[in-house]
Image (spheres, rainbow, N blue to C red):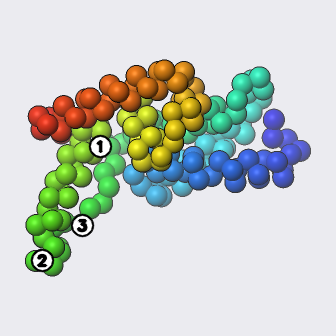
Amino acid sequence: MFEGKESSTRQLLERLRRPLYGTLLRLTRNPADADELFQETFVRALSASARFDASRRFKPWIFAIAVNLARDRAKRAAHPATPELRAPEDLPERNRNQAERLWILRADLLGALETLSEPHRQVVEWRYLEGLEEPEIALRAGVARGTVKSRLHHALRKLRDALRSGDSP
């Protein structure tokens, strides 16, 4: 698939760089891990290119490789990566109360997101963090648009319930 097509491979890499890296960054919450997984995604795609079915779309295929790599890394890790947050006590006094509220809200939201199944968390991140529309999410996930709508609906309901009840880890 990639053999003898250096310029088209380079163009494809450039076109997919931002959305693929953004997805990996959201999944890993670590720029170094996202960089490493981005490179590994293309290495895997190159090595599996002979098995790629040219009648199917390339973008969902390579995103599936990336998501699976990120999922495998998360399983191997002792605990999921968490974003580095500046502790409220490290801030000037005048900003401390607001920072404490934001710290708690962010921690609660991240905890609630972690309670969602992978497919539900992915559609929420793609829709609200990446700003993708439902048709693009459907393509990326390799599912019907109705499935995306259903997953978003159920995920948002679960998030709302978890945040209201304080059930997030």
* Residue at the disc numbered 3: 86
Hey, what amino acid is under mark 1?
Answer: His
| Mark 1: secondary structure | loop
| Mark 3: secondary structure | loop
| Mark 3 or mark 2: whose residue is earlier in sequence | 3
Residue 30, percent from left and from top: 42, 55
Instruction: Identify the residue at image location x=19%, y=58%.
Output: 103
Q: Quadrant of the N terminus?
A: top right
Question: Nearer the viewer's eye, disc 2 or disc 1?
Answer: 2
Which of the 4 image quarters holds residue 154? top left
Residue 165 vertical position relative to residue 22 in the rendered view, above or below: above
Q: In this image, 57 relative to 160: left or right? A: right
Residue 47 visible in image? yes
Question: Nearer the viewer's eye, disc 3 or disc 2?
Answer: 2
Mark 3 → mark 2, Cα distance in angstroms = 15 Å
* Residue at the disc numbered 2: 94
Q: In the image shown, does 14 or 44 lie closer to the viewer?
A: 14
| Mark 3 or mark 1: whose residue is earlier in sequence | 1
| Mark 2: secondary structure | helix
